[in-house]
Image (cartoon, rainbow, N blue to C red):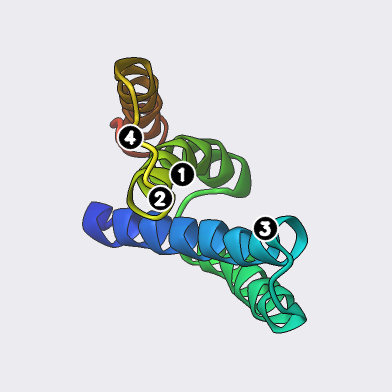
Amino acid sequence: MDVFRSILLFILAGFFEIGGGYLIWLWLREGRGFELAILGAIILVLYGIIPTLQPANFGRVYAAYGGVFIFLSLLWGWQIDKVTPDRFDVIGASVALIGVFIIMYWPRS
């Protein structure tokens, strides 16, 4: 398994899911244009395709992706919404990322 490629796919999937969801959020919560909802929906469909490129099985990929999503969501909030993660956010995201690496990349016999 190419770990670097797998990590890039997780990051790409995360930005598509969070970005698409954010556009839907802007439409519904902030009254922005319907075109953002359409674009968000398209991006969310693409997000659904990206994990299929991972080499592992569905359950493992989606379980591990949850940890990546936690980290990227906090990063998104920090950079886009200007909400700085506190130490508990950082600790929690670190624990989640450790879980990702155990689930996806720990050697198995």
The numbered mark, 3 or 1, whose residue comes first in the sequence reads 3
Q: Residue at x 65, y 63 (%)?
A: 26
The amino acid type of the residue labelled 2 equals Trp
Badge nearest the viewer, 3 or 1: 3
Q: CA distance from mark 1 to mark 2?
A: 5 Å
- List the residue tagged with mark 4: 84
Q: Is residue 86 left or right of residue 18?
A: left
Q: CA distance from mark 4 to mark 2?
A: 10 Å
Q: Is residue 73 above or below residue 97?
A: below
- List the residue tagged with mark 2: 76
Q: Give residue 75's position: percent from left, percent from top.
A: 35, 45
Q: Residue at x 53, y 38 (%)?
A: 66
The amino acid type of the residue labelled 3 equals Trp
Q: Residue at x 32, y 18 (%)?
A: 91
Q: Secondary structure at mark 2?
A: helix
Q: Secondary structure at mark 4?
A: loop
Q: Is residue 28 above or below residue 59?
A: below
- Assess whether mark 1 and mark 3 are in contact (beta carbons under 8 angstroms): no
- Which is more toward the observer, 4 or 42? 42
Q: Secondary structure at mark 3?
A: helix
- The reply to whether residue 44 is in sight is yes
Q: Give residue 40's position: percent from left, percent from top.
A: 65, 72
- List the residue tagged with mark 1: 73
- List the residue tagged with mark 3: 25
